[in-house]
């Protein structure tokens, strides 16, 4: 319940009963029997652990010369950013199934294909880190 106080949900606070909480969650498609997610679950996503980002940032700071991130002689310095990522992707459906397994949710996972999937792929080009 303390978490609800830190990140409030409208109409729910740390003193809310289980019934009130379940009623609010149902408005978002979450019940003890099923969870409804938007789209089809087919879009692919890449995930990065915060510690991996920290490690990559230190690596870049210690080992990358800014001049190596763009072409010599270019009139304008462009595309000098360095992406950090895993280069691996997983479907939203797979992520949802892993979360269900991890938390022990035995209900049904449902997909509302009348809602948008969003961008089909979000995979970072990490070639500058090679």
Image (cartoon, rainbow, N blue to C red):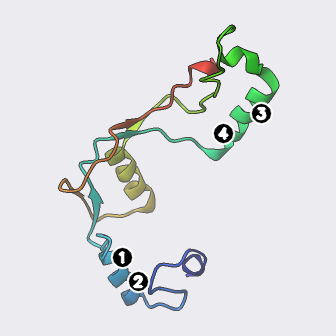
Distance from Cα at disc 2 to Cα at disc 3: 42 Å
| Residue ID at (28%, 48%) | 117
Secondary structure under the numbered disc 4 in the rendered image: helix
Q: Are marks 3 and 1 in contact (CB under 8 Å)?
A: no
Distance from Cα at disc 4 to Cα at disc 1: 32 Å
Decide: is 10 above or below 119. Answer: below
Taking depth in this image into account, of 31 and 68 the one nearest to the observer is 68
- Neighbourhood count class around disc 2 (C-alpha, 10 Å): few under 14, some 14–19, many 20 upward: some
Q: Residue 39: percent from the left, percent from the top?
A: 25, 52
| Residue ID at (60%, 44%) | 49
| Residue ID at (59%, 23%) | 79
The residue that mark 4 highlights is 53
The residue that mark 2 highlights is 21
Q: Earlier in the sequence, mark 2 or mark 3?
A: 2
Q: Nearer the viewer, mark 2 or mark 4?
A: 4
Q: Earlier in the sequence, mark 2 or mark 4?
A: 2
- Disc number for residue 58: 3
- Neighbourhood count class around disc 3 (C-alpha, 10 Å): few under 14, some 14–19, many 20 upward: few
Q: Residue 59: percent from the left, percent from the top?
A: 75, 28
Decide: is 29 above or below 95. Answer: below
The residue that mark 1 highlights is 25
Distance from Cα at disc 3 to Cα at disc 1: 41 Å
Q: Earlier in the sequence, mark 4 or mark 3?
A: 4
- Neighbourhood count class around disc 1 (C-alpha, 10 Å): few under 14, some 14–19, many 20 upward: some
Q: Quadrant of the C terminus?
A: top right
Q: Quadrant of the N terminus?
A: bottom right
Q: Earlier in the sequence, mark 4 or mark 1?
A: 1
Q: Are marks 2 and 3 in contact (CB under 8 Å)?
A: no
Specify whether 22 is left or right of 51.
Answer: left
Secondary structure under the numbered disc 2 in the rendered image: helix
Q: Are marks 2 and 1 in contact (CB under 8 Å)?
A: yes
């Amino acid at each position: 319940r303390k978490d609800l106080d830190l990140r409030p949900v409208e109409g729910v606070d740390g003193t809310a009963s289980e019934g009130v909480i379940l009623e609010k969650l149902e408005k978002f498609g979450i019940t003890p029997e099923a969870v409804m997610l938007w789209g089809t679950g087919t879009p692919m996503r890449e995930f990065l652990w915060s510690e991996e980002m920290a490690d990559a940032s230190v690596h870049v700071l210690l080992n990358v010369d800014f001049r190596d991130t763009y072409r010599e002689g270019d009139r304008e310095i462009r595309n000098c950013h360095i992406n950090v990522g895993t280069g691996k992707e997983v479907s939203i459906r797979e992520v949802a199934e892993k979360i269900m397994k991890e938390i022990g949710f035995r209900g049904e996972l449902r997909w509302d294909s009348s809602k948008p999937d969003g961008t089909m792929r979000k995979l970072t080009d990490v070639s500058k880190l090679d």
